[in-house]
Amino acid sequence: MIGALDKPTEGKVFIEGVDVSTLNDNRLADLRRRIGFVFQFFNLIPRLSARENVELTMAITGLGRDERRKHAEELLETVGLKERANHKPAELSGGERQRVAIARALANNPKFLLMDEPTGNIDSKTAKEIIELVKRLNEEKGVTIIVVTHDQHIALQAKRTVQMLDGLIVKEEVNRHESK
Amino acid sequence: MKVNDILSYSFGAIKLRKLRAGLTTLGVVIGIAAIVALLSISQGLQDTITVQLQTGLATDTLIVSTGGGFGIGAGGPMGAPDSGFSLLVNDTKTINEIENVETSVAIIQKACYVKSNEREFIRYVVGVDFAEYKNIYSTAFVAESGDIPLNPDNETIVVGKRISDPWKNETLFLNVNGTIEILWTNATARPPKNETYTGHVAAVLREIGGFGIGGPSDFSIYIPILQARDFFGTDKCDMIIVKLENDDEATIESVSEAIKEVFSGQVSVTSSTAVLDIISNVFSTVELFLAGIAAISLLVAGIGIMNIMIVSLMERTREIGILKALGMKSRTVLLIFLSESVIVGLMGAAIGIASGWGLANVVARVFSGGGGMQLGNHAAATGGMAITPVLTPTVFLGAMAFGLIVSVIFALYPAWRASKLKPVEALRYE
C-alpha cells in the first residue's frame, strides 16, 4: 500500500499528502513512477538486458532514447554493474540481479525506495554487499529507503524501525547508531 | 510511453516466441491469401471476359433464340422449354423488316467430329452467311491468313485460330488450303445417317479470345449457310444475330419487343449488354460467396490470435505486474497487447497479400496455359483464355484493413483483461 500498488479497504494511506484511496488507476500509476520498487524476487523482465530493464522504467515515463540510455549506464555504474549491462537477468547472479533492480528503482529519481525483503533471495555475503550499496545510496545520494525485512541484521542498520506483528504495529524506535 | 517504445517493446515480446507468433501469423496469412487470390482471379477473369465480350461482340447486336434461355458461347439456349417452335433460316427476312434493324444473320450450329491428319476433335460447326457475319462482327470475323470468301463455293470453310493451332505452339492442325473432314450423324433420319463434309480451308481467323455469344469463336469451324442447310438437312437455325442501327437502350428495348411480337413470344431476345450485366451479376455473387468462405478462414485466424493472446496474458501476468509497479498506465498495457496483435495481423496481411497474389498468378497460368485444349474438347468456348489476375488497390487496402481489424478485434478482450490486472495480484502470480 505504501507503494500505491493497492488501495486500502479501510483507513487511509497518505503519500505526499494525498490520500491514495481517492486516486484512480491512472493517478496511482503516476504516483508509482515516483516510488522505486525493489522486490524479493527481483522481478526483472527476463528478455531484456540489465540496461534495458533500467531503461524500461524511463521509457514508461516517456524519456527519450539517448537520454535514458545514458542515465541507465550511469545508474548501473553506481550499483557496480557497468560491465554486465548487456547481460540478461538469467546470466546474472542473484546479487547482480538485485543490483539491477536497485538501479531500475532509482531510474526515475524516486521520492523513496521501497524494498521488500531485498536480501531474502540471495546469499548472506551478497546480501551484505547489497546492504552496503543501499546504505551508500542513502548517505551519498540522500535517498529515503524503506525496507521490509525479517532479517534483524538489516533492521538494525536502519535509522528507524517499525516492528509489525500480524498486521499491527507493535514497536517503533529510532536507532541512533552514528554512521561509521 | 512513446509509441515507438510501445512498438519495440511489443516487437521484442513477439520475437521471444517466434514459433508461436509465426503460427498465429500463418493463420492470418492463409485467410488473407485466400481472399486476395480469389478476388484477384475472379477480378481478372471478369475483366478478361468483359473485354472479350466487348471486342468480340458488338454492343449493337441482339441474339434471338428459341425458348427462355440465352446461349453462352457456342452452347446454345440453356434450359429452353420445348414448345416445338424453331427459328428458320429464312426468318432473318422477317426480322430485317423491323424498324432499326440493320441486318441479321441465321446461325446453324452442331457439334461434329472434325478430322484432319488422323487427329480428331469434337468442335462446333457453324453454318452462317459469311458476308453478313463479317458485316456484324467486323472486328472479330477477320482472317489472319487466307481470305474469307464472301460468295463461297461448296466446300469452303473458315476456321477459328484454335482449330488451326490447337496447342498454341504453332504445331498446326490445319492451315489455309488444308482439308478437313467433318463428320455428323443425322439422328433425325431413319435410319440415322452419318454425313461427311470435306472442307477446304479458305481462311483462318485472327485470334479472338475466349468468349463469344453468338459471335465468332476461336474454336469453331464456319461453313457457308447454304451448305450447312444441305449438310445438316434442316432449315431450322439455332439463333439469329441481329445487328441494330445503333446501341441505344431504347432501340435495344423496342427491337427486342418487336422481335418477340413477330414470333408471338416464342423466342427470347438477348442483348449483349444484358449478357454483360448478367455475367457481372453472376461474378459479383460468386465473388461474394468466395470472399465469404475466405472470410471464415480469417475468422478462424482471429480466434487463433485471441487464443494466443490469452495464453500470453496468463504467462505474462507477472510481467504486467512489474510494468504496472513501474508506473505503466493501464492504457499503455492495453496498447502493448494490441500492438503485438496488430504487428502479427499486419505482417500476416502483408505476407498474405504477397502469397495470395503469387497463388493467383500460378492458378491463372495453369488455367490459361494448359487448360485451353482440355476445355476446348468440351466444345465450350472458355478454353485458352488468358486470365491476368488483377490486384485492385481496393483489394490490397481491403486485405490490409481486414488483417488490421481482425487482429484488433480479437485482441481487444485479452488486452483489456491485461490492462485491468491489479498490480499486487499480478506480482503475486506465479
Image (cartoon, coloured by chain):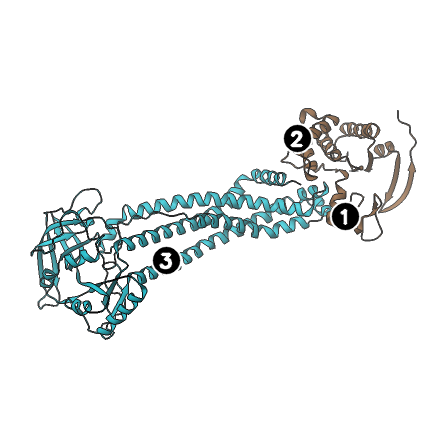
Q: Quickly name the residue at label 2.
A: A66
Give the spatial CA distance, label 3 vs label 1. 60 Å
Q: Label 1 belongs to which residue?
A: A6
Q: Which residue is mark 3?
A: B283
Q: Where does the image place residue B38, in percent across and percent down from the top left?
A: 40, 51
As measured in the structure, the alpha-carbon distance from the residue carrying label 2 to the one carrying label 3 is 57 Å
Q: Amino acid at mark 3?
A: Phe
Q: How far from the left and from the top, in percent, is residue B250?
A: 31, 66
| SS assignment at label 1 | loop
In front of the other: B326 or B211 = B211
Question: How many numbered marks have been drawn onto this rendered protein structure?
Answer: 3
Residue B392 is left or right of residue B248, and the answer is: right
Q: Where on the picture, by quarter, is residue A52? A: top right
Q: Amino acid at mark 1?
A: Asp
Name the residue nearer the viewer: B95 or A77. Answer: B95
Chain letter, brown in picture: A
Neighbour tally class for label 2: few under 14, some 14-19, many 20 plus, Cα within 10 Å: few
Tag 1 subunit: A
Q: Is residue A154 left or right of residue A68?
A: right
Above or below, B324 relative to A10? above
- Image quadrant holding the C terminus of chain A, namely top right
Query: Mark 2 — on which chain does it sit?
Result: A
